Image (cartoon, rainbow, N blue to C red):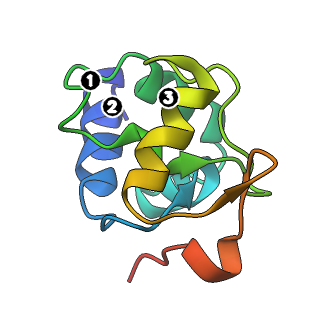
Amino acid sequence: MQPGKFFQSVYEVLMTVPRGKVVTYGQIARAIGAPRMARHVGYALHVNPQPGVIPCHRVVNREGYLAGAFAFGGEQAQRKLLEEEGVEVIDGKVDLSKFGYTFN
């Protein structure tokens, strides 16, 4: 998959995640047919061309932890955005069994 198409696929899939839910980098990678490219998903989110439109704050690591290097203001900014959507964050972590989203 070409880099531009890969990034666009990441953004398109992420746009389907509803408010109040989160997904992992690996889930996005699997959803776009690139299961071994979770780190590349992270890079695509880091260079998100439309922050505030493409909800990269809804992505956490496989254990539910927030992104320490969240590109648009750090972990506290990500926490704030998630909490505004009703996602509970405790000690920098989201309960995936409660707030996790599953792609169809």
Residue shown at 42% from the left, 26% from the top: 44
Q: Is tag 3's residue or tag 2's residue first in the polypeptide sequence?
A: 2
Q: Nearer the viewer, residue 90 or 97?
A: 90
- Image coords of residue 102 (percent x, y): 49, 78
Numbered disc 1: secondary structure = helix
What residue did someone put label 1 on? 4
Q: CA distance from mark 3 to mark 2?
A: 23 Å
For residue 49, say whether it is visible.
yes
Q: Nearer the viewer, residue 83 or 49?
A: 83
What residue did someone put label 3 on? 77
* Quarter occupied by the C terminus: bottom left
Q: Amino acid at mark 1?
A: Gly
Q: Is residue 103 above or below residue 78?
A: below
Q: Quadrant of residue 16?
A: bottom left
- Marks 2 and 1 in Cβ contact (< 8 Å): yes
Residue shown at 52% from the left, 48% from the top: 59
Q: Nearer the viewer, residue 91 or 70?
A: 91
Q: CA distance from mark 3 to mark 1?
A: 27 Å
What residue did someone put label 2 on? 7
Residue 50 left/right relative to 85: left
